[in-house]
């Protein structure tokens, strides 16, 4: 028994040594075959704690950054509640635009502003133009406005029956047009053709209305917008009605412009239209005062007898029929009056000195009305002069010393 035990005990160490050496050979061979992988695995296992900490630190940093960015995005620029006008020129880069906004005090933190613009996809989509910002806005809202191109709008009211020069003055007040370019384009044949205007001037086709313009719109674009409105307002049925009256579109606009210049009261316009329509049927000259001075540069004041004798293609005191083009830009009321004159036999009218007119069917009646209203006007002038002389003649009470 002892021998067998001894033999077993002697055999076991040999087996164990053999198995150990086999394992060592296996491990040695694995390391030899994949030395880089082995080193990477060993390094990974040793640095696992460091990496875990780094990942946690990165997550914390990202969370803090977004928390600060959200706070920046939805906090007012400042509490001054001031309104700032900022002009971003066409072709400005994102960085240039940011510099302009920064100088105006609208960008307090460039890093967060850049980050917010990148996240919102606005970096390459900021629109040029003139902007109005209140400092109570948040950066989020401000970037939305810049991205949408929500530029400052100028509400412009163009009254009916104004001339080209009068409209130019209104638009130039808000610096919306270049006046020199405006008048050049008004007679530019290619520009007129692009607007479907078959005339030598844009006069008559700039439709009176209320418009929202902005300074990013150039002069030509503003003029086009007004002409587009004309084509929307002048319907095919109106053009057909004019044709039935033996008037083409240009003649209709010309006729309507004279009606509009003669009276500012819409209820009177069909009667003014009737006078001119009846005169044309009888072969009489229109004899409209505004036509006599239309082509006089910068005319202001009263129309005199000398003006009525002027040799001008527009002066209806010396020409027969309609002038070669409109003398103003008529609105719907003037156009409708031209298309539907009142069914009356009037061929004369005279001012009643209050903006309205007295209409007559005969020369005798007209002469009576002229005499009446001229005398009335002279009496009104005399009363005004008497009031002035009384106020000048009043004794100024002596001051107490």
Image: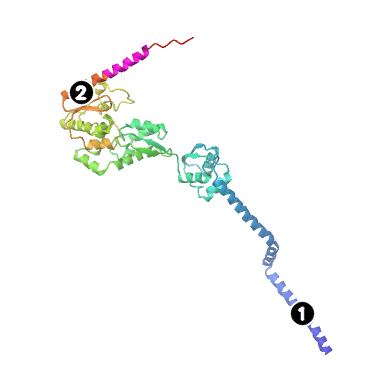
Q: Earlier in the sequence, mark 1 or mark 2?
A: 1
Q: Please tell me which residue is depicted at 73% across the width and 77% down the height of the picture.
A: 22
Can you tell which quarter of the image residue 47 is in?
Answer: bottom right
As drawn, 361 above or below 144 = above
Q: Please tell me which residue is depicted at 26% across the width and 37% down the height of the picture.
A: 335
Q: How is the image coloured?
A: rainbow
Asked if the residue at tag 2 contacts the one at tag 1, i.e. Cβ–Cβ closer than 8 Å, the answer is no
Q: Which residue is mark 2?
A: 369
Q: Which residue is mark 1?
A: 16
Q: Secondary structure at mark 2?
A: helix
What span is in magenta? 379-393
Tell me if mark 2 has few (under 14), some (14-19) or many (20+) residues whose alpha carbon lies within 10 angstroms of its own: many
| Percent of width and height locating residue 86 | 49, 38
| Percent of width and height locating residue 326 | 27, 33
* Towards the viewer: 353 or 148: 353
Camera-near label (1 vs 2) is: 2
| Percent of width and height locating residue 211 | 37, 38
Can you tell which quarter of the image residue 186 is in?
Answer: top left
Is 389 covered by the magenta stretch? yes
Q: Secondary structure at mark 1?
A: helix
Judged by its main secondary structure, the magenta piece is helix
Residue 185 is left or right of residue 9, and the answer is left
Residue 276 is left or right of residue 98, and the answer is left
As drawn, 236 above or below 308 = below
């Amino acid at each position: 028994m002892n021998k067998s035990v001894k033999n077993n005990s002697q055999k076991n160490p040999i087996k164990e040594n053999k198995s150990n050496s086999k394992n060592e050979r296996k491990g040695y061979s694995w390391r030899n075959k994949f030395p880089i992988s082995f080193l990477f695995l060993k390094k990974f296992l040793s640095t696992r704690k460091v990496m875990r900490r780094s990942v946690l630190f990165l997550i914390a940093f990202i969370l803090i950054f977004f928390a600060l960015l959200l706070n920046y995005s939805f906090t007012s620029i400042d509490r001054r509640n001031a309104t700032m006008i900022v002009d971003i020129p066409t072709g400005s880069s994102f960085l240039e635009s940011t510099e302009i906004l920064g100088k105006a005090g609208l960008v307090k933190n460039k890093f967060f502003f850049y980050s917010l613009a990148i996240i919102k996809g606005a970096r390459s989509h900021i629109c040029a133009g003139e902007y109005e910002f209140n400092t109570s806005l948040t950066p989020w809202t401000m970037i939305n406005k810049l991205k949408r191109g929500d530029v400052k709008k100028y509400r412009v009211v163009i009254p009916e029956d104004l001339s080209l020069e009068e409209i130019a003055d209104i638009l130039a007040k808000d610096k919306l047009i270049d006046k020199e370019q405006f008048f050049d384009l008004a007679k530019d044949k290619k520009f007129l053709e692009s607007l479907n205007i078959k005339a030598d001037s844009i006069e008559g086709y700039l439709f009176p209305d209320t418009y929202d313009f902005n300074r990013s719109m150039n002069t030509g674009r503003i003029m086009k917008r007004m002409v587009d409105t004309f084509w929307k307002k002048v319907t095919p049925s109106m053009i057909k009605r004019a044709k039935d009256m033996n008037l083409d579109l240009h003649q209709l606009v010309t006729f309507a412009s004279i009606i509009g210049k003669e009276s500012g009261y819409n209820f009177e316009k069909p009667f003014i239209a009737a006078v001119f329509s009846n005169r044309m049927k009888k072969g009489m000259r229109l004899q409209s005062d505004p036509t006599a001075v239309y082509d006089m540069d910068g005319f202001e004041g009263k129309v005199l007898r000398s003006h009525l004798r002027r040799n001008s293609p527009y002066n209806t005191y010396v020409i027969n029929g309609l002038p070669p083009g409109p003398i103003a830009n008529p609105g719907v009321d003037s156009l409708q009056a031209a298309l539907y004159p009142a069914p009356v036999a009037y061929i004369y009218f005279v001012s009643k000195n209050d903006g309205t007119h007295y209409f007559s069917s005969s020369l005798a009646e007209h002469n009576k009305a002229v005499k009446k209203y001229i005398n009335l006007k002279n009496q009104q002038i005399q009363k005004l002069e008497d009031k002035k002389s009384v106020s000048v003649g009043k004794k100024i009470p002596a001051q107490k010393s």
